[in-house]
Amino acid sequence: LNLSETAPDADLARESWLFVPKDRWVQVWQMCINATVIVSGFFAPLRYALLDSEDVGAVFLDSVLDVIFAADILFTFNVTIWTPSGYIISRLDIAKRYWWSGRLCLDLLATAPVDLIGELAGLPPSLTS
């Protein structure tokens, strides 16, 4: 059963430029985000434990991961939420659910550029990398 084709408000969601969770490309995006989380899970400890804080390749990869996660935050604000009564297509209701689920805070903390924040705060690199 493909909910995006049978739910009466899926077309309304698409007309509002919202994404329907059961659309194939949304599922592909989620799989890419999951893969990015795995890469980040392996890379972050290696970077902070073993690599030089000035390693250009490591800084670049970390920045790319941060951009991907920031894009996912924006994406999440535009994905409808399926409930038994239909899709939630109000962006305000979607944002409230994202906030109250606690995921928004975690996503923002995970995406925060720790090195840049530490540098702006005047902390020595040894404390942020």
Image: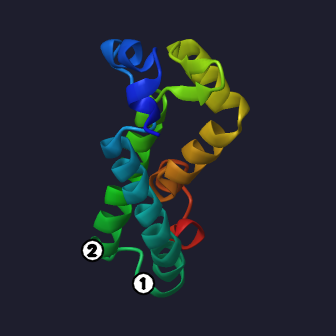
Q: Is residue 19 visible?
A: no
The residue labelled by disc 1 is: 51
Colour treatment of the image: rainbow
Q: Amino acid at mark 2?
A: Gly
Q: Is residue 91 left or right of residue 20?
A: right
Q: Secondary structure at mark 1?
A: loop
The residue labelled by disc 2 is: 57
Image point (48%, 63%), residue name: 37
Q: Position of residue 115 (x, y in %)?
A: 47, 59
Q: Is residue 51 left or right of residue 94?
A: left
Q: Position of residue 22 (x, y in %)?
A: 43, 38
Image point (50%, 50%), residue name: 111
Q: Are the residues at dot 1 and dot 2 in contact (C-beta closer than 8 Å)?
A: no
Would you call the spot at circle 1 few (<14 residues within 10 Å), some (14-19), or many (20 or more)?
few
Q: Amino acid at mark 1?
A: Leu
Q: Is residue 125 visible?
A: yes
Structural distance between the alpha carbons of marks 1 and 2: 10 Å
Q: Secondary structure at mark 2?
A: helix
Image point (32%, 77%), residue name: 55
Q: Residue furthest front?
A: 1
Q: In terms of depth relative to the viewer, which is nearer, 10 or 66?
A: 10
